[in-house]
Structure formats: C-alpha cells, structure tokens
Image: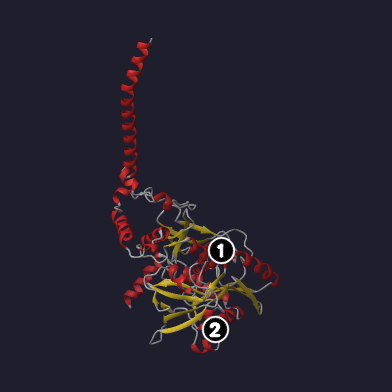
Amino acid sequence: MAHYQRNIRFLFFIIAPIIGFILGWSVSQKTFSSAAAEGSTPKEKAAQVLEPEIGEVRKEPGLKISPFGKSGVSSKNVDLDIFWETWNTLEKNYLTEADFDTKAQIYGSTKGLVQSLGDPYTTFLTPEEIEEFEESMSGEFQGIGAYIEFKDENLVIVAPVNGSPADKAGLKSGDFIYKVNDELVHGLSIDEAVAKIRGPKGSPVTLTIIREGERKPLEITIVRDEIVIKSVEWEMKEKVAVVSLHQFGTNASEEFQTAVEAIVLKNPEAMIVDLRNNGGGLLDASVDIMSEFLDRKVVVKTKGRNFGSSGDLVSRRGGSLLNIPLLVLINGGSASASEIFAGAIQDHNRGYVLGETSFGKGSVQNLIPLSDGSSLKVTVSEWLTPKERSIHEAGIEPDEIVEISDEDYENEVDTVLNRAIEIISSGQLPELMSAQAEAQEPQSEGDITKQNDKNTQE
C-alpha cells in the first residue's frame, strides 16, 4: 500500500506542471484572441489603463455613443505612443513638479481632442462648467447678461439681455468680441469664452469689440451683476396680447402656461409673440410653447449622422391658441430655438413674421454626461424647418422686413411692434396671410414653363 501511494505522489508531481502549462497556454490564447478581436493586444491594453476611468459614458436616448475602443474606431489603428511620450517627458523635465495635476492633464488633453474638430459648438465641459451651464439655463447666474455665439469664426454678441449690465453698457447685437481683458479670444470654444466673460457680481470685465460703422475697436468695461432672466412677460396693448419670450429656459413652458391662462380671460383679438433678442435655449421648451399654436404639426426636422439624430418633432394636440391671429417678431438677436419657432409658424402659414433676418444658428447639440460628472456637448445634427429650409447661417427671413431708423433707435421708438399693432388694428392681417400662403404654394410645371419662357423673352 505504501508503495502504491508513493507511485501516486510521483505521478502527481510529474503531471501537475504539465496540466498547469496547458491551462496557462489556453488562457493566454483566449486573452490574445479576445484582445485581437477588440483591436488591441494585451500589451496595447496595458497602455489604455486610463480608458475605463475617462471613457465610460451613459447613453442618451436615441444616440449610439460609446467609449474609445468600442465605437468602431479600432485601437490598433490609433497610435497613442506620442501622447504617453509627451506625458512622460513633461513629467520628467518640467521645472515645477507641483504644477502636475493628473485630472487637469486628462481634462486638458480631452478638450484638445474635442477642439481638433474645429466646431465651436462641440465642447468638453468639466463638472464645474456643467454647473455653470445649468445655472444659465435656469435663468439665474452672475455675469454681464448677453447671449454669445460664433459667426463666421468670430465671437459675436447675439443680443444683450434687457436691463442687464451688457445692455446698460451699450453692447449691441452684432458686436464682435475681439479681446476679453486684453486676452485674444481667437481659438477659444464658446464655453471657454463664456467662462472668461462670466464672473462674480461686482467684478469688472473689459471687452474689446469691433462694431460695424466704427473705425477703431471699442473698449467697454462692464461690472458684472446677478443676472435674472424672466423667460416670459406679457401685456395688453389695446386688444392685443403682446407676449415677450426672452429665452426658452427651464421655466419657460411653465411661465408661458401661466401667462396663457391669464391672457385667455382677457379675450384678445390677436397675439404678438416677441422673439427679438431671444438667444434660444431648450428645444423642448420651444416645442411645448409652439404646441399652443400648432395642433399635431411638424415643428422642426433634424438631419444627423446617426440613428436617432434624424427625424421630425411634432407638436402636441389640443393647444389653447390654435385659432387666434398671430404675429411673430424677430431680429438679428433671435437664434436657435427662436428660429425654429418662427420657421414653423411661417411654414404652416400659422402667423405673420416681421422684423429682421434672424441670427442663423441651426446646428443641434446633445449634452452627453460622462462618468465623472463632466459632459460632452456634441453637434449631432442640424435643424430644418418643416419645409426643410436650412436655418444654420441662413437664418429665418421675415415675411415683412421692418427697418429701424437711427432716430427711432435713439428715441427708443419700437418701430417693429408699432407696425405689428398697425397690421392688426387696420385689418390687414388676413390679406397679408393670404398673400403669404399664395407665395408659399409650389408652382405647377405649367407655371414654371411660362416663367422660363418669359425670362427667355426678356
């Protein structure tokens, strides 16, 4: 028996290493095969140790968003050696070792990646920047009080907020911002520029601006203040309800509903929706408000690259203001969601739009949260009106252009609003709406042939 046990132990010591080798080889082959299928070898995977920490994202509804290495960009086709080489070289050679902040380095490199796209509206936002963004959408923040966008690669004032420090200091729609506190803004994203302009109440900021008609740049110093933007204000002028929508913020839908309840009791003959200097805001708020005027109509079309980024947005049914005569006022400070509103009203011949051509901001950004509280604001599609007119850069041209003279501007005479009230009080609106409807009707082949013949004869 003892002899038998010795033989068993002898065989175990011989066979066990062989089994271990086979198992180890099998596991390594599976690991290599799995890594090859994902586009990286185990060695390459080791270089991506930071990827799960900074690459995880939570999907937004309708979007296919995934971290690097799982998004169809195979890591074997992306050489990150130069990134790590730069990181290590800085770490070994840079004079002030205390300046090395791993989180700041990761955020900085991520911002650089996003900025390489050359789209000022696609940005990476740190958790602190996200907090500021949400504050601005709530309608309360500290700063100068102005809507700012990029146009023709320049940072431009879309519109100052009524009564804000920017408004009182004399900033105008169309002013190009050249410097902020003597620092050039060229190359900054929209969010970085806003961060430099915004600041605590009572602190000054100096903007160097270029204004049409001025021979030299202007330096305007503005003292920041608490900015509170009331989304909706309204008043009765004679028998016309004039509703001013200042922004489509988080409270806009609720404020508008409250206003509508009061307006209906006044039994107005018509309504004017004033979108001048409304820099936009939340698309959902715009659609909610349009649903009061349009019953189950397409209010905007989106055209994007991915599934879920294209499609039609339709108004709800049963609005309270479906039949009230409507005029919409716009100007160069009307942007984004304001342009969607005006374009939908035009295309469905629901109202008459007058004023000036709008700003022309028609690209769509999705705010996609990342795992550590930061976010990506990504351009995913563009907005088109229900009749598929492009908004971006073109803007919305009003049905009637109303020019404001310098004298009226200086005397604070509201030429556009006065013209709108004149149209209603004189009974011109039905005639103007009818003419607008005829102008929007597509021509028949016969009409086009006749027009071509006429052009040839001329």
Q: Quadrant of residue 15?
A: top left
Position of residue 87 in the picture relative to residue 352 (left or right): left
For the C terminus, the quadrant is bottom left
Pick out the residue farthest to the front.
2
Q: Residue at x 42, y 58 (%)?
A: 103
Question: Which residue is tagged 2?
Answer: 415
Secondary structure beneath disc 2?
helix
The spot of residue 413 in percent (x, y) is 56, 86
Front residue of this view, candidates 357 and 423: 357
Front residue of this view, candidates 97 and 315: 97
For the N terminus, the quadrant is top left
The spot of residue 220 in percent (x, y) is 46, 83
Q: Is residue 395 visible?
A: no
Label 1–label 2 contact, CB within 8 A:
no
Residue flagged by tag 2: what amino acid is it? Thr
Question: Which residue is tagged 1?
Answer: 285
Above/below status of 109 relative to 195: above
The spot of residue 358 in percent (x, y) is 47, 73
